[in-house]
Amino acid sequence: MKTSLIISFMLVLTITTHAQQIIDITSISRDTLCNKGVHTISYNATGTFNPGNVFYIEISDITGSFANPIPVGYSNASLTGSIIFGGMWGFPIGSGYRFRVNSSDPVVLGNDNGYDIYMFKVDTAVVSGPGYLEATTTHPGSTFQWLENQYNLIAGETDLIFYCSAIQGFGYSVEVTQGGCVDTSWGQNPGVTNAMRELADVSPVIYPNPNNGQFSINHQGNNKEIHVEVVNALGQVVYTHQGQLAKHDIDLTGEQNGIYLLRVSQGGKQYVERIVKQ
């Protein structure tokens, strides 16, 4: 009887001690994480933890599995605290991620956050043409700020397309904001080749420019099939035409006033012209 009581007491003590050590995530700064951003997870731990204990965040794989978790942030804080983490560049983009906060001494695996987290990557791709750079993202609601030599803000240059001349140093880059996430492209300079002469022996004439939305392309001397498109400052294609092009009329009167990009493509070569509708 006495032995039975001792075993029962030890079992109750073991269960009670384990139950006291619980770690829960109380908040995550964002439900959509920027893969190059800095984020915060707040947690609450109950029970007794030894001196020198470290609380640390683990992230699951994209399916929510902790079979091979990856630690992404640490803290020596008290039972209730916050951990700042970032640097998740190599993680696949998508939803299904989970987080948990664990302790090192004693080793306790915390409860996961209870819902799926989405990992997002900003599209900072830029193409270069003669006298311009263009961000190619199609993500809705994107905003842009062009920079000189990676860091110097260029006042007023906030469109998808940036008209510029080559400079020394790191060239130009664009800071793109999408879904609350921010990233910056690598620096580069605009192309310097004469795409007009590459495209055909006779340069197309575009007139009038500026215009009220109605203008013409005259490309006499070229009987090959040509693709024409007009793109607005948001990167949306507002006009397209394909066929043999000697003279072609374009009507953008239904579009807003502003700057547009006219692209004329043929055989892998491209001519680009800035169109001003006013």
Image: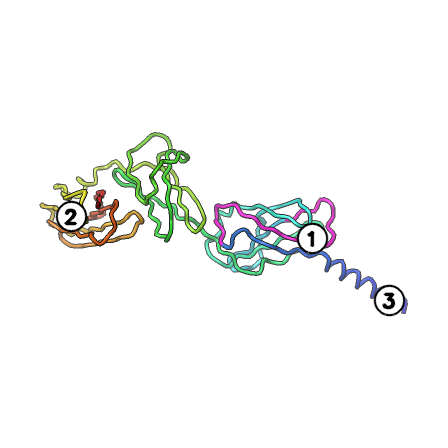
- Which secondary structure lies at badge 2? strand
**What percent of the width, then of the height, locates residue 217?**
14, 47
Residue under circle 3?
5
Task: Please tell me which residue is depicted at 39% across the width and 48% down the height of the picture.
Answer: 123
59 left or right of 173 in image: right
Outermost residue, left side: 221
Q: CA distance from mark 3 to mark 1?
A: 29 Å
The colour scheme applied to this rendered structure is rainbow
**What percent of the width, then of the height, locates residue 247?**
11, 49
Closer mark to the observer between disc 2 and disc 3: 2
Q: Considering the image in quadrants, where does the N terminus appear?
A: bottom right
Q: CA distance from mark 2 to mark 1?
A: 72 Å
Residue under circle 2?
215
| Precedes in sequence: disc 2 or disc 1 | 1
On residue 107, which mark appears?
A: 1
Closer mark to the observer between disc 2 and disc 1: 2
87 left or right of 221 in image: right
| Precedes in sequence: disc 2 or disc 3 | 3
- In terms of depth relative to the viewer, which is nearer, 265 or 157? 157
Q: Residues within 10 Å of mark 2 (few under 14, many from 20)?
A: some
Which residues, given as a range, are shown in magenta? 32-55
Q: Looking at the rendering, which quadrant does residue 3 occupy?
A: bottom right
The amino acid sitting under disc 3 is: Leu
Task: Please tell me which residue is depicted at 45% across the width and 52% down the height of the picture.
Answer: 120
Labels in figure, total = 3
Q: Residues within 10 Å of mark 3 (few under 14, many from 20)?
A: few
| Precedes in sequence: disc 3 or disc 1 | 3
Q: Is-magenta flag for residue 185? A: no
- Which secondary structure lies at badge 1? strand
